[in-house]
Image (tube, grey):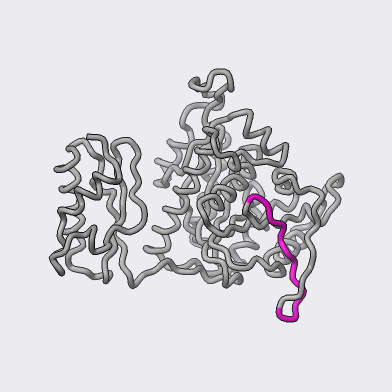
Amino acid sequence: MTPTKENVLDALSHVRYPGTGKDIVSSGMIYGDITIEGNKVSLSLLFEKPNDPFVKSVVKAAETAILTYIGEDIEIKGNITPFHKEAPPTKPASILPNVKNIIAVFSGKGGVGKSTVSSNLAISLAKLGYKVGLLDADIHGPSMPKMFGVENERPYMEDVDGKEMIVPIEKYGVKLLSIGFFVDPENALVWRGAMASNALKQLITDANWGELDFFVMDLPPGTGDIHLTLVQTMGITGAVAVTTPQDVALADARKGVNMFTGDKVNVPVLGLVENMAWFTPAELPENKYYIFGKEGGKRLAEELGLPLLGQIPLVQSIREGGDEGRPVAFSSDSITSAAFLQLAEKVVERVNLRNATMDPTHRVEIKH
């Protein structure tokens, strides 16, 4: 039998919680969405207390019920995550008190499509109904104004409780700020590290971001002053690595992951995105050509013990959308739009799990 949300819930309705004798569906223990990918079923169960003595037995009973009532070939074991009410999603220690989750998108090297992933991820999160902000933190190569089609926009200032604050530009349901709004796009930015870091801090602390569920930061490629500035300025919920499948990109992605997860920084990496995973021509939508190698990002994720958040194909429409100021995620019917929407759903899932199982990330004190 093919798993559906309906028959999964029907199977789970046969499982009783020993503490009350009621079934886990009618008593509201199914937490969040049920995810179905082929024969793989993933879900979460909500318990009253973190030390609930029935957690293991209920999870085991739920696995057995799904295998019994749907089919023995269902991949369910290890895919049921217990949550408890005493540990709601935590806010990171941040200078942005009205922002629930701060996501840093990074890459070990340039040219892997990090900004494309950042912009389409932000728009996809907004499409899912979340309040989203996007900071173009790539100080030396700001590209978001062009990708959003707002190159000629200029943010204005407004008074907020007696302080002049920058008002972000809003488009596609996303609040956006970039150093590109404040400089001549024809001239290269030649700034020393301290100047760039101070400019970035202003875009964070002197802007009226309001209430946000997700604050996505598109970081510069590599590892340097800007990355250290950000981890010292705010508590980052988690980071997302972007790479392409070829070896040179994978080697740099590994360095970036090691920087975030190292003892000095210690920011959780939510997972890895393999961009340009294959090329699909518009006239042959079923064909896949592995121009940069096959599944290099997937192998790296397995090697590092990280989830593979998504594989994004190399499609002409993605490039065209970025150049024309209409990111492909804003479309509602394309294969690539669906790929970015799935990526956003996976990021939300990983953030919820991270917040329920780990302490908030505090601002980092780096001593030289």
Instruction: State the residue in front, 267 or 224.
Output: 267
Can residue 110 be spotted in the picture? yes
Instruction: State the residue in front, 342 or 197.
Output: 342
Instruction: Name the residue: 44% across, 42% down.
Output: 308
Instruction: Name the residue: 54% across, 18% down.
Output: 284
The picture quadrant where one finds residue 99 is: bottom right
Q: Is residue 253 left or right of residue 191?
A: left
Instruction: State the residue in front, 331 or 57.
Output: 331
Q: How many marks?
A: 0
- Whether 201 is among the magenta residues is no
Q: Position of residue 355 (x, y in %)?
A: 42, 63
Seen in the picture, residue 311 relative to 231 is either above or below; the reply is above
Q: Is residue 180 left or right of residue 35?
A: right
Q: Is residue 62 left or right of residue 216?
A: left
Q: Position of residue 18 (x, y in %)?
A: 13, 65
Instruction: Name the residue: 43% across, 53% down.
Output: 350
- Whether 164 is among the magenta residues is yes
Seen in the picture, residue 41 relative to 162 is either above or below; the reply is above
Q: Quadrant of the C terminus?
A: bottom right
The picture quadrant where one finds residue 215 is: bottom right
Q: Is residue 69 left or right of residue 260?
A: left
Q: Position of residue 133 (x, y in %)?
A: 62, 58
Region of the chain picked out in magenta, as a range: 161-172
Q: Quadrant of the N terminus?
A: top left
Q: Position of residue 177 (x, y in %)?
A: 71, 57
Can residue 250 be spotted in the picture? no
